Amino acid sequence: LRRNPGEAEFHQAVREVLHSLAAVLRKRPEYAEAKLVERLVEPERQILFRVPWSDDSGEVHVNRGFRVEFSSALGPYKGGLRFAPELALDTVKFLAFEQIFKNALTGLGIGGGKGGADFDPKGRSDAEVMRFCQSFMTELHRHLGEHTDVPAGDIGVGTREIGYLFGQYKRLANRFEAGVLTGKGTGWGGSQARTEATGYGTVHFVREMLATRGEDLTGRRVVLSGSGNVSLFALEKAQSFGAQVIACSDSSGYLVDERGLDLDLLKEIKLNRRARLDSYAEARPRAGFHTRGSVYDVPCDIALPCATQNELKEPHAVRLAKNGVKAVAEGANMPCTPEAVRVLREAGVLYGPGKAANAGGVATSALEMRQNAGRDSWTFEETEKRLAAVMRDIHADCVAAAEEFGTPEDYVLGANAAGFLRVADAMRDQGVV
Ligand code: NDP
């Protein structure tokens, strides 16, 4: 706390992990002696830099860029870039810290990092976004490399931005180093199913959680927050497993369509037109768009928070539990507050934390790196099959670790313990570095 004043989100993420690790360190005191936890909570490197650029009218803007290279114990730093106006070091550090455990859970040999900028791409022209990305990469490129640090997308950074970032990296490095960024276009080194992977993976994880109680997704009412990359593909996969997805949201409100959301219309609005959700209700008058209350007020069996951190708060959890929700799985990073998690767990709701439930995105990024290293390209079906297997394994590892450390069905403990043990073993083997 003293070393990182004012970093509330980072403290929240660390506190949750430390709470879980108490049970691990009691059983494995040798990890405490090696001060592995003290080393793990300090980033290996933090990079802050100026990003100057000019808009279409010639006006000059100055943003701040970040890259937190948190842990390379298991492989090159790996984690997305977020472009969002309020982004600060605190958020980047919490995301990078969570990424260490998430990436360890995939078992695919990747370290943890995260980055981004306090830049808002909304309302900017393609040319402005391109100039911003070029300026951002002009500084960041010296810290990257396929064996060093491999960013991907996150909020505000999709295939368009990754394209501009890659173009500038290639120009500066004078090398077509495909493995330096993931989430690339599928025509030039990107993996099939990467765009879909986080949302699909979250639903695979929910399916595994439900199966532990002999249940499945067929006919279940599903509510999700957000309507971005993760949400839309979670929606797609949940529908394909027979669920009825009835509500989603964006930062302006939430949409309810009791007959089931029309995915094609949503994709047209959000991905092609980059428009607001209320245009859905204009096209489908049976649906309702609400600016008061919350998407979590809609009675459901399964809730998938897929928007942003700390969006599902205690009163939302109380409402969900009262309405009989069976499972909550985090497509976003840390979307549930600690108070909300406590309410859900006390109500006996299956709760899948983001570092396990949304690991499908980074797992498929690691598969993209493998394809790039082998100059190979797998089909959509092949990639999705591997993604589903990774999610099954992560679920099984969480269940096993939760049992080993004394709290069956506690996926928070399971994910933190299983992830920590992989990183801790590697750190111990590599000495005090
Ligand atoms: P996008 O930018 O594609 O989508 C974010 C969505 O959330 C948008 O619809 C946005 O609405 C909405 N949103 C933002 N704030 C709120 C809010 N307070 N209430 C309701 N909706 C809100 O981002 P992604 O889908 O890529 O990422 C979403 C989350 O998933 C993040 O936490 C990210 O870190 C995490 N994640 C993403 C991965 C990926 O592969 N993309 C991998 C693993 C985790 P609006 O458009 O109005 O702003």
Image: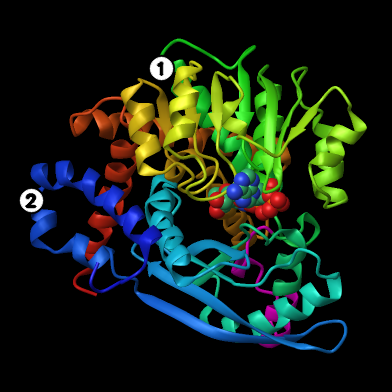
- Label 1 residue near ligand 1, CB within 8 Å: no
Residue 262: x %, y % from top left: 82, 28
Q: Residue at x 52, y 33 (%)?
A: 389
Quote the CA–CA distance across marks 1 and 2: 32 Å
- Quadrant location of the C terminus in the rendered image: bottom left
**Number of residues whose C-alpha sits closer than 10 Å to that of mark 2, classed few (under 14), some (14–19) or many (20 or more):** few
Res. 273 mark: none
Bounds of the magenta span?
167-183
Kindly identify which residue carries mark 2.
Answer: 29
Kindly identify which residue carries mark 1.
Answer: 212
Residue 340: x %, y % from top left: 40, 36
Task: Give yes or no for residue 351 being in the magenta stretch.
Answer: no
Give the camera-side residue of 60 and 97.
Answer: 60
Res 294 quadrant in image: top right
Residue 325: x %, y % from top left: 49, 20
* Mark 1 and mark 2 residues within 8 Å of each other at the beta carbon: no
